[in-house]
Image: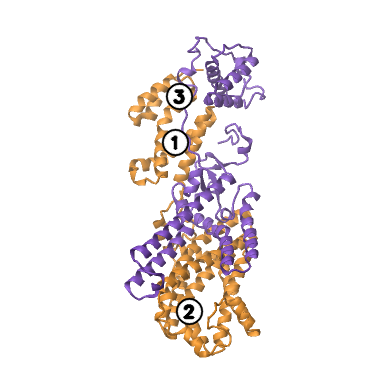
Amino acid sequence: MSTNPGSTLAQRVTGWFGRSEDQAVAAAEQAALRSDRFRLEREPEWKRLEGIVARIEKGRMRRISDEDLLALPALYRTVASSLSIARETSLDRATIIYLEGLAQRAWFIVYGPRATLGGWMRRFLGGGWGASVRALGIDILIALVMMITGTVVGWLLVSSSPDWYYALVPGGDGDPRVPGASRDVLLKSLFGNQNEPALAVFASFLFSNNAQVSIMAYALGFAFGVPSILLLVHNTALLGALLWLYHGQGLTFELIGWLSVHGTTELFAILLAGASGIHIGRAMAFPRQASVLDAAAAAGRRTAQVMAGVVLMLIVAAMLEAFARQLLDSTAPRLIVGTAMLVFWIGYFFVWRRGQTAGPDAGDGA
Amino acid sequence: MARAKAGPVRIDPHEDRRRRTILTPEGVRLPLTIASRGSRAAALLLDLVMIYAAMAATTAFLLWIGLSVLGIKPERLDDKTALGGALQALVITYFIAIFLFRNGWFLLFELGPRGATPGKRIVGIRVAARHGERLTTEAVIARNLLRDIELFMPLLFIGGALMSGDDVEIAAWAGLGWFLIFVLFPFFNRDALRCGDVIAGTWVVEAPRRKLEQALSIGQAAGVRSAATGTEYRFSEAELAIYGEYELQVLERVLRDDRPEAMADVAEAICRKIGWNVGRGDERAFLDAYYTQLRARLEHGMRFGKRKADKNTPGAG
């Protein structure tokens, strides 16, 4: 084997590492194997990257100097190329395993989740959410049809036999809203509750309950969307039953006002959750050219953003339900608030568009 | 990288089945090891224990504030006084904290630079996007939304039945069946994906943290002369030509383990092959020299495009 010291190269490579430079060069000159000289010359750079990566992994971003942060991508590429060279020229398994591990850790950081939570939130509210809702396309219509079907079915079932009411509406004992209730009783359930205490507690309870239901409607889309549809139909059948009950006493309009305050937001959120579930189910049932797994993954990422928005909408809905509804004690203002919310959501999702980089994965380029 | 399969020699066949390769944008192939199902279960259990401990601690803390510090009784929740308001605030905090623990724990930790919850960190695994893509915020959200039906739903199912008192048995069986479908899901695909991984396009891989070990062929050990006995170990081409890369790596492992019995066995095996005789007690120096010279020979061959995978590979010089 030829033993060319190659000290000028070593000096150039390790030139900026101060004291370790001389040691590295000296060791490299001593080493008998060419692959060991290669390793010794580059070791300081590997160690530097390892230090930066370890600090980032520990979440100590502040303790990393700008210089190190700027050097990170270059160091990562150096290690990646060292790995390729080592694989072709070295049989030192320890070095290769170390480089594979280090390159992997650095790769996760260089190509990891790009945005901070705040940055993601800004992008999400500033158009990303609306784009992902629009990306659902036809599935929103399917979910809407299912919800209307559910309402109609609920109405028809209860009007054919009032016994269905008890099966659909999970009323506790003492709930006055049962078939045969007088007009006065029903009217009282809609108005005059503004002195009901602990509204905020009620709101937080409502929110966590509704959010859990909508997450379920989404997650169940996994079974080809069928359970999502069932959940949509079942929940809106309840609505149909309530409508029938109040319609019987000529209170349809008042009930709609009572429901619309928070209902336009809440039902919209449930619609989107169901549509997301159907979207996933449809992507898995009909994956087109992609494999089922890839289609499911693409649909899942697209709809995840919608779901983050659904949770936000449900927070708004719970606030409206607990505060606005009790404070607005007549039908007209309730309808105004409900309609305004509906117009707001539709405008926000479908009319207001910003930037043409639609899709949740946009803007993630390396 | 023209030589896709020229990676390190595979030694453990069981681990082999879990190995995957991703191609980075730089064109470098990085090996990944899919986390075993057992380690994932362990990580999940650790996380659940931590979550429930955190929930219990929050509950206890809020109760303590409510009962001891503020000295209010539950029936005063509806009071329109300042105390009633304080109690309401506590209840709201409770609802939100429980919701966040249930849905936010996995989400926030997996979005961090380590891509792992505390449980996963302890076990040494992390979340990654399949096929070497960038792990996105959306993917992490998606995979954790499904956790809800996989994990918490059956519990609620059984809990609800217990509370209402009827159909406990049916609910328990239904919950168990449901739970089993999702728990067993990772056993029916090669990558051990759970349903959330399928939806999000992620998988869970091992996140090893290795130190760079000392090179065996550097310094004193690499010399031809044994420090203890002064014997010179210099091998001929023919004596080195019998072994390939696989044997070299086995030898490397033996040297790193540094167990005298194992080294004596290996030295004896080599000696039998090449017809040498090593003095008792000097196996380490003999093996060090053989390792360095074999590696030099094989690496020399590599540079000329001639590789010898193991002792059964013919030719190569």
- Label 3 sits on a secondary structure element that is helix
Residue A23 lies, with reference to residue A207, above or below; the image says above
> Which kind of residue does numbered mark 2 sit on?
Ser
Q: x, y (%) of residue B130?
A: 55, 48
Please identify the quarter of the rendering in which residue A203 is found.
bottom left
Chain displayed in purple: B
Q: Which mark is residue A37?
A: 3
Image coordinates for residue B253, horizontal then vertical, percent: 55, 27
Secondary element type, mark 1? helix
Amino acid carrying mark 1 in the image: Thr
- Which shade is chain A? orange
Tell me the crowding category of disc 3: few under 14, some 14 to 19, or many 20 or more residues within 10 angstroms, Cα based.
many
Q: Of B304 and A316, which appears nearest the observer? A: A316
Q: Which residue is mark 1?
A: A78
Give the CA separation, mark 1 to mark 2.
61 Å
State how far apart marks 3 and 1 are (Cα). Answer: 16 Å
x and y, in percent, of residue B208 in the image:
50, 39
The answer to whether one can see residue B105 in this image is yes
Q: Which label's residue is closer to the chain start, 3 or 2?
A: 3
* Marked residue chain, label 1: A
> Is A331 positioned to the left or the right of B189 in the image?
left
Mark 1 vs 2: CB contact within 8 A: no
Viewport quadrant of the C terminus of chain B? top right
User: How many angstroms separate mark 3 from mark 2 (CA)?
Assistant: 75 Å
Q: Which mark is nearer the camera, 3 or 2? A: 2
Residue at which label 2 appears: A260
Callout 1 crowding tier (Cα within 10 Å): few <14, some 14–19, many ≥20: some
For badge 3, the amino acid type reads: Arg
- Quadrant hosting residue B196: bottom right
